Amino acid sequence: MANLVYKRVSTDQQSTARQDLVLAEAGIEDPVVFEEDPGTSSRLHPLQRPKFGELLTYARPGDTVHISEMFRLVRGNQHILDVLDVLHRDRLALRIHDGAFSAMDLTARHPRTGELLSTVKFMVQTLAAGELQRDLQRELTYDGLRAAEAKGSKGGRRPAVAAAKTDDVRTAYLEGRSIAALARDHRVSRGAIRTAVADLLPDRSAAEEDAAAPELPVTLDMPGKVADYLRTAELEPAERAALDQGVTVRRGQNYTLRVSAVPAVHHQLLARCQPLDGGQGLPAVPAQRKARREYENRVSALTP
């Protein structure tokens, strides 16, 4: 039984190095290799590709077709199903050595009808789109890195400023050379230049350092009895706006008002509804006092 290896790349700028590595790790014995000419379009149906056609002509029942990844052979669901039908007709096995399909027997057929098992067809249709796209992206990334390396470029972060060049960088910066220009001159990142001249950079003003970060709005549920009272009270514009923009949430016969405001406004609203606790010659209504304390508990959890 022969082991037939199929390899393909999409452009003459690409290499089969990754395929060679995957297939070598698979330990295939006495492989017979069929490699498409560089640049054979992936849009061309697999059964119309010259070298895959030669492979099928050469193959004998019981042989195994090996590919590194599914997308080397096919580009979509129908391609997969067409190829599987031909392999079944010729009684050939298929082994995919990398990717999600590597753990699947795609040639499994119903023993009576000879049709592709429905479970296999379902998995093919489910996995194919995402798997082929991921494999293609990985191929393009890999080949892009190779092309960059061939031109002398390397991936990853740019290096730091060499120790021997640090004094030159600092002198040029003091003479007025910009950080961007120095980064271009020395082929490093702007961050590397900033690190080299860190002690020469202008300090931020004291006002900037001491300025407090702006408060962010916080959403709290205000009990309906508190909201009803506050709507009749005299409020500052910011307080009134927060109340007017609140969202009513029904809870049985009662409701809460979902209010979004900075913590300071929540504290001001809490202070406005202090009379609900009683005092100032006003009697306390238990339900209102309970609602006010419920709101107080929520506001107290905020940073003043």
Image (cartoon, rainbow, N blue to C red):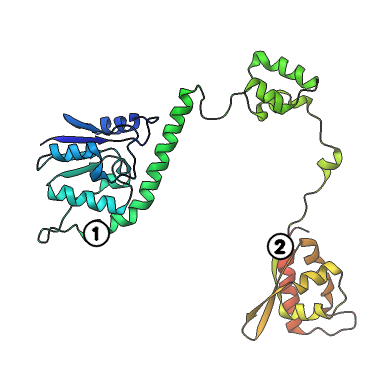
The first of marks 1 and 2 along the sequence is: 1
Q: Residue furthest top?
A: 164
**Three-letter amino acid code at the position of disc 2:** Val
Q: Quadrant of residue 256?
A: bottom right
- Residue at image location 88% in from the left, 76% down from the top: 234
In the rendered image, the quadrant that contains the N terminus is: top left
User: Residue tagged by mark 1?
Assistant: 119
Say which residue appears at 72% left-offset and 68% top-offset: 297
Tell me if 84 is positioned left or right of 158 in this view. left
Image spot of residue 63 (x, y percent): 13, 40
Q: Amino acid at mark 1?
A: Thr
Q: Secondary structure at mark 2?
A: strand
**Which residue is label 2 attached to?**
218
Instruction: Please name whichever residue, 194 or 69, is drawn nearer the observer in this view of the structure.
Output: 69
Q: Characterize the local packing of mark 2: few (<14), some (14-19) or many (20 or more) Cα atoms within 10 angstroms.
A: some
Residue sitting nearer the eye, 246 or 21? 21
Q: Nearer the viewer, residue 132 or 229?
A: 132
Could you tell me which quadrant the C terminus lies in? bottom right
